[in-house]
Image: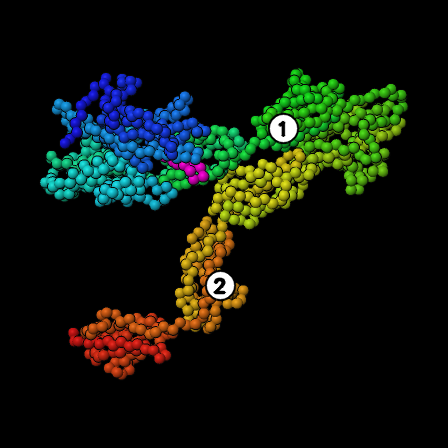
Amino acid sequence: PEKSETVTPAEAVPAPAASESPAPPAESSQNKEVSSAERKPEEPLDPIGLFVARPKDGEVTVGGSITFTAKVAGESLLKKPSVKWFKGKWMDLGSKVGKHLQLHDNYDRNTKVYTFEMEIIEANMTFAGVYRCEVSTKDKFDSSSFNLTVNEAPVSGDLDIRAAFHHMSLAGGGRRMTSAFLSTEGHDDGAEFNFSSLLKKRGEGKSESQSDVDVWDILRKAPPTEYEKIAFQYGITDLRGMLKRLKRIKKEEKKSTAFLKKLDPAYQVDKGQKIKLTVEVANPDADVKWLKNGQEIQVSGRYIFEAVGNKRILTINHCSLADDAAYECVVGDEKSFTELFVKEPPILIIHPLEDQMVMVGERVEFECEVSEEGATVKWEKDGIELTREETFKYRFKKDGKKQYLIINETTKEDSGHYTVKTNGGVSVAELIVQEKKLEVYQSIADLTVKARDQAVFKCEVSDENVKGIWLKNGKEVIPDERIKISHIGRIHKLIIEDVTPEDEADYSFIPQGFAYNLSAKLQFLEVKIDFVPREEPPKIHLDCLGQSPDTIVVVAGNKLRLDVPVSGDPTPTVIWQKVNKRNDLLRNNDDSVTPSENSSDLNTDNKLLCESEGRVRVEMHEDHCVFIIEGAEKEDEGVYRVILKNPVGEDKADITVKVIDVPDPPEAPTISNIGEDYCTVQWQPPKYDGGQPVLGYILERKKKKSYRWMRLNFDLLKELTYEAKRMIEGVVYEMRIYAVNSIGMSRPSPASQPFMPIAPPSEPTHFTVEDVSDSTVSLKWRPPERIGAGGLDGYIVEYCKDGSTEWIPALPGLTERTSALIKDLVTGDKLYFRIKAVNLAGESGAATIKEPVTVQEILQRPKFWLPRHLRQTLVKKVGETINIVIPFQGKPRPKITWLKDGQTLDSKDVGIRNSNTDTILFIRKAELHHSGAYEVTLQIENMSDKVAITIQIIGK
C-alpha cells in the first residue's frame, strides 16, 4: 500500500521519525523535522570511537527542514576536532553551504562536549540518499553513516503535478532541474545548476581530451551497478538527478508518425565549436519549430535553420555556456526532445608559480595566471590538498585570470612545495621559511673630530624594517636641533652638528628585537695653541707622529676629512703630495714627479694645493689646513705627505690613507656532481677582498626562465664549496655567489652555466637469453621502470668470461634497441652478460644474467609443422601460381631435400628457398606435368623427419 501523510500546519511540530516523544520546545515555532539523534535519550559514551552521539537516520517532506546532530567528547582533546559532512562516498558538503544547507558547531564548557549540526532547509527529492559524518583529531579518526528519506508532498485539490514539475524544471529563465547543495558562496541564486559541469571529467594531470566521450550514451548502456563508478570517473556531482533525466529520456522513445528519425537523447559539443541538430520528418513539406528551454528560437547569425528533403537541421555556431540547454523540434503535435551539453576547454597555466624565501612571520603570496577568468583551481602543499576549511591559515583569491594563495603569517611548518593544478596543467614552487636573523652589513666606526665640526655615525643592517635606539655612555640619545637621528631603508645614522668636548663618549646602536650592540667611540680633537714667538719655525701638530706613518682607514664612497693643526711665524706655506712607493717619488697636484731628496727645493707656485673645489681638495685656515677627499676610491689609497715651509724652517709628516670596500664579485661558480635533486657548487675567492678579510659567502639560486633569485643560506658559507639540495628534477637552474667582508656584501657574480638536476635511469628489466648458437648469443630486455627527466640515450651491453673480472663491450657504442645479437664468440666459452641504461646523468645499475651462458649450438630434433590445408591434395589450375610454405624446427640448421615421385626436382622448373625456420616451394605458372607426389626431408646428423604433399593440376 502507498504511504500517505497529512500536511502539518506551520504552527505544529511534525511527529518525529524515530520516536514518539515530543520535539524540544525550542523548535516548536519552526517548521523543522529534527533527526532522531536529538530525540532519543542520550546514549552511553563510545569506548572506542570519538562520537558521544552519532547522527541518526531521518525523514522529511519536500519543502521541509531537518537537522542532523553529532556530538564528540572533548575532555581528552588538546584542540577542536575536524569534522566533515559528505553525501554519498565523495561529495564534500563543506563547499555547498548556502540556501539549502547550513553547518553549525558549538562547545559546552560544562560537559566538555562538542556539538556539530547539519541543517537541511527546504528539502527536495534530490536530497535523499546516504550521508556520512567524519571526525578526526591528531591521532584518531571515526565516521558514521546515516540515511535521509525525502517524502513527496501530499496532493490536494486539482493540483497539476506535470505543470508543477514543468515550472520547477524551467525555473530561472529556462534553466533545468537544480541539484542539492550547489551554492558555494551562500547566495540564494547559487542553487541554479549548470549540467554541463557534469560532463567534465576530473582526471587531474591528464592531458588527453574527453571531448569524444558521450556520458549519456555510457549511462544508457551501463548496468545500474556501474552508475556510481561512472559518476566518479566523469566528475558527475548529481548522479541521482541525471538518472531521473535519463529515465525521462528513455520513456520518450516511442513510435512517431511525424518523425522518421528523431533527435538523439543528448549531444555534447566543445565551447566555441558548432553543432548540427538533425531530424528526418515523414512529410517533406512539413514545417517545424525549434525550441530552446520551451522558447521558440529565432533565426540569427548563430542559429541557422535548413530544410534538405526530409531533413530539418538546426545549426548552432560558436557554442557558449548559454547554449547548454534543452532543445525541442516540434512538428504539429509531436515533439522530439534532446539535451545539449557544452564543455569548456581545459584550463591552462600561462604564468607558473615562483619559488619564494621569507622570514618567519612574513606574508607570502603565490600567484599564477590561467587561461580562463574565474577558473576553478586546486592548491596542494606537499601533495595534500588545501581546503576552504583551512581559511584561518590560507586565503584563496581570484582576480580575473590570476589565482592567488596567500599566507599572512608564515611559520617554519609552512616550508615545502606548493602546487596549483587545473584540468590542463600543473605548476610547482618551493617556499622556504627561515628563522628571523639580522645581519650587519656595515658597523659604526670610531670618529675623531675637531670642535665645531660634524660627526656622523652610520650603520647598515639587513632588514630595512628594523628600528633601533642610539645610546651615549649607556643612556638613550634624545634628538634636538644639534643632534639628528635618521632611518632610511637599511641605513641608520646619528648626526652631531658643532661637536663640543662634552660629545666625546662611547656611542652604541641597538636594533630592536635583536641581541646586537654596535659600538664606536667619538674622540674630540683638541687644538692646543701656545704662545708662539716671532720667527718660529713651522710645526705640524699631530697626536701620533713617529718613524712609521700614521694610518687612516676610510670606507670607499665615504668622505675623508683630515684636519692638520699647524703653527709657525711667519705663516708657513702648506704643500700636499702623494708619495709614489715604487721609487720613492713624490706625486704632486699637477701629476709631475720629483725625486724625494729634492723635496725641500720644491717650487711652491706649481705644487701648492689651493683649489677649494673638486673631489680632492685642500682648504687653508689660519691655524690648520684641511685635506678632503669626497667619495673615497681605491685609487686614493696611499701615503700622503704634508710639507710646511717658512723662512725659518720646514716640517713634514706622512699620513697613510687606506681605502677599504666591499669585495669584488667572485667569478661565476661551477656546478658538478649533479643528481636527481642536488648538485655541488664550487667557486673561487674574489680577486680583490676590499682590503678586509672575506668573512664568508652567500649563495643564490633561480630557475632559468624566472627572474626571482632565492637565497640558499642565511649563515655565511666559510668554505668554497656547497651542496645545494631540494631542487626539482628536470627544471633548469642557475647559481650565483656573493662575497662578504666586514664592510658589506659584494655585487653578485655572473650566473653559472645553466644546469638541470637529473638522475641516471634504473636498471633494464626482464633481461634474458633468447637464443644461442656456436658463435652467437641473442639477448633481449625491456626498458627501465624509471627513466627520469634525463631521458634514455641507449644501452651498454657487456660480457665477461667465467673466471675473469674484465668486462668487455659486446657492441660498439650504445644501442637504442631492446635486443642484441652478439657475434664472433668462441665456441665453448662460458660467458656472463650484463646491460646498463645510459642517459645524460650517467649509467644505471647493471642488469645481469646470474648463470654463465655456454656458447654452443643447442641440439633440437628436426620436425615439420605441416599446415592443415596441405594435408589434403592441393588442386590448382593451369597457369596459376603455386607457393607452398612449410615451417619446421631443428638445430643446428638441418639439410633440406625435395623429391617428386622419388626423383630430384629440376631447379629450372621449380623454385626452392630455405631459411632457418621454413622451406618454400614456388612454381610461377603451373603446368599439367607439375602434378604428382612431392616429398621433403629434414636431416640433422642421424635424425630426420619427412612429409609428403600431393599436387594436382587441372585444365582451365
In the depicted view, which residue is nearer to us: 9 or 578?
Answer: 9
Location of residue 327 in the rendering, given as x and y in whole percent from the top left corner:
20, 35
Going by the image, does 779 lie left or right of 881?
right
**Residue at (49, 62) in percent of width and height:** 813
User: For mark 2, what is the residue?
Assistant: 798
**Residue at (30, 18) in percent of width and height:** 26
Location of residue 88 in the rendering, given as x and y in whole percent from the top left corner:
30, 35
**Quadrant in the picture for residue 230:** top left
At mark 2, the secondary structure is strand
At mark 1, the secondary structure is loop
Is residue 754 visible to us here? no
Location of residue 540 in the rendering, given as x and y in whole percent from the top left corner:
83, 27
**Residue at (36, 29) in percent of width and height:** 45
Location of residue 236 in the rendering, given as x and y in whole percent from the top left corner:
29, 38
Going by the image, does 789 lie left or right of 185?
right
Question: Which quarter of the image is occupied by the C terminus?
Answer: bottom left
| Residue 54 disc label | none
User: For mark 1, what is the residue?
Assistant: 515
Q: Amino acid at mark 1?
A: Ala
**Quadrant in the picture for residue 895:** bottom left
In the displayed structure, 611 sits above or below 922; it is above
Question: Which quarter of the image is occupied by the N terminus?
Answer: top left
**Number of marks in the image?**
2
In the displayed structure, 57 sits above or below 877; it is above
In the depicted view, which residue is nearer to us: 260 or 218?
Answer: 218
Magenta region, residue range: 376-388
Going by the image, does 585 lie left or right of 122?
right
